[in-house]
Image: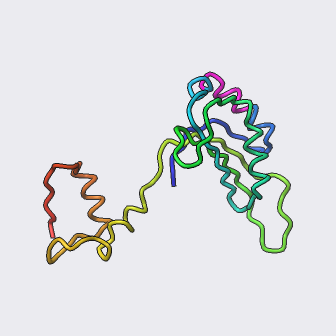
Amino acid sequence: QSIHELWGYAPSGLYEDIHADVRARTEPLWSSYATCSFKFIVDAFQHTRTMDERVQLINSFSYLAFQGRIDMRAPDETFTIFEDWPFRPAGVRPEPNPRRLFLGRWLGGGSRELCRTYDLKKRGYISTTSMDSELALVTANMALAAPGKIFYDPF
């Protein structure tokens, strides 16, 4: 789960429409990201895309003219192409186009993996009782916990 800044939307599901919307909506922003490292992701809901199809879709946004290096591990900016495909039962041919298309600039993501990282079974022993990892993360967030601050476990 993540939050994206909307750069384009095509309720028709046609790439021509999303390209027109991206140009109309965000052209003044392009120069701000011209030299940043970047990557594109294709997120197809209810559908799969081959690597060649993904590359072709990503290349269709080349008019954004980003000059920065492509960095798939730690980019400065991440852009996601979201495809929303209609549900289809097994054995039924897929529709030729998605139901809707979105292009977004990634702003932030969830930290759900922290619950697994700080799971009681994986944490170091501190005392006879320990707070559940999800409750500990919520409580620490509410208390504005930070390095060097003291936080008392209420249990």
Question: Mostly what secondary structure, the magenta segment?
Answer: helix
Indicate left or right for 52 with 154 as reference. Answer: right
Q: Which image quarter is the C terminus in?
A: bottom left
- In percent of the image, x 65 and y 41: which residue is there? 103
Picture quadrant of residue 133: bottom left
Q: Please say whether residue 27 is one of the residues in the magenta stretch.
A: yes
Nearer to the camera, 120 or 20? 120
Indicate left or right for 2 with 79 as reference. Answer: left
- In percent of the image, x 77 and y 67: which residue is there? 88
* Percent coordinates x, y for residue 12 in the rendering: 78, 44
Q: Please say whether residue 48 is one of the residues in the magenta stretch.
A: no
Nearer to the camera, 106 or 102? 106
Range shown magenta? 21-29
* Percent coordinates x, y for residue 66 in the rendering: 65, 30
Q: Is residue 13 visible?
A: no
- In percent of the image, x 37 and y 65: which residue is there? 115
- In percent of the image, x 72 and y 48: which residue is there? 100
Q: Is residue 100 visible?
A: yes
Task: Tell me how many marks there are.
Answer: 0
Picture quadrant of residue 31: top right
Indicate left or right for 88 with 6 as reference. Answer: right
Image vertical order of residue 45 relative to residue 76, above or below: below
Image vertical order of residue 110 relative to residue 64, above or below: below
* Percent coordinates x, y for residue 64 in the rendering: 69, 30
